[in-house]
Image (cartoon, rainbow, N blue to C red):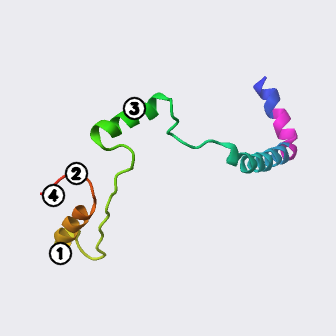
Amino acid sequence: MLAALARFAVRRRWTIVVIWLVLTVLGGAAAGRLSHRWFQSFSIPGYSAYEANQRALEKFGNGEQAPMVAVLTSPDRDITTVPGVEDAIKAAVAAVPSPSLPTLV
């Protein structure tokens, strides 16, 4: 059966290529038109993940906003050897209003 399918595909390869191209274009057009209808939220009230997130927010004071991550770079050397980097990190930590921030060692 697979041999017969292979012979069919080889004999009509350009027809199959055209069909795949048409299906690809139609699929792209359909996805573009339907994308505004998709509900893209991970926080649906009433579902268990949303409710667990709300309980964590109430109990621990976090979970609602993704953590802020600072990325420090230096083009020519290790960032820990740049003068004043520790003071800059401490100033950034002090500027974020949160009672549960980790301390720098």
Q: Is the magenta stretch mostly helix, strand or loop?
A: helix
Residue pointed to by mark 4:
104
Dot 3: element: helix
Residue pointed to by mark 1:
84
Dot 2: element: loop
Q: Residue 35 lies in magenta, yes or no?
A: no
Residue at point 51%, 34% (across, down): 45
Of mark 4 and mark 2, the one earlier in the sequence is 2
Circle 3 or circle 4, nearest the eye: 3
Of mark 3 and mark 2, the one earlier in the sequence is 3
Residue pointed to by mark 3:
52
Residues packed near mark 3 inside 10 Å, few (<14), some (14 to 19) or many (20 plus): few
Query: At label 2, which amino acid type do we have?
Result: Pro
Query: At label 3, which amino acid type do we have?
Result: Ala
Query: Seen from this angle, which residue lies furthest left?
Result: 105
Residue at point 80%, 47% (across, down): 26
Residue pointed to by mark 2:
99
Which residue range is magenta in the image?
A: 7-15
Query: At label 1, which amino acid type do we have?
Result: Gly
Query: Seen from this angle, which residue lies furthest front?
Result: 58
Of mark 2 and mark 1, the one earlier in the sequence is 1
Residue at point 58%, 43% (across, down): 40
Mark 1 vs mark 3, CA separation in Å = 41 Å
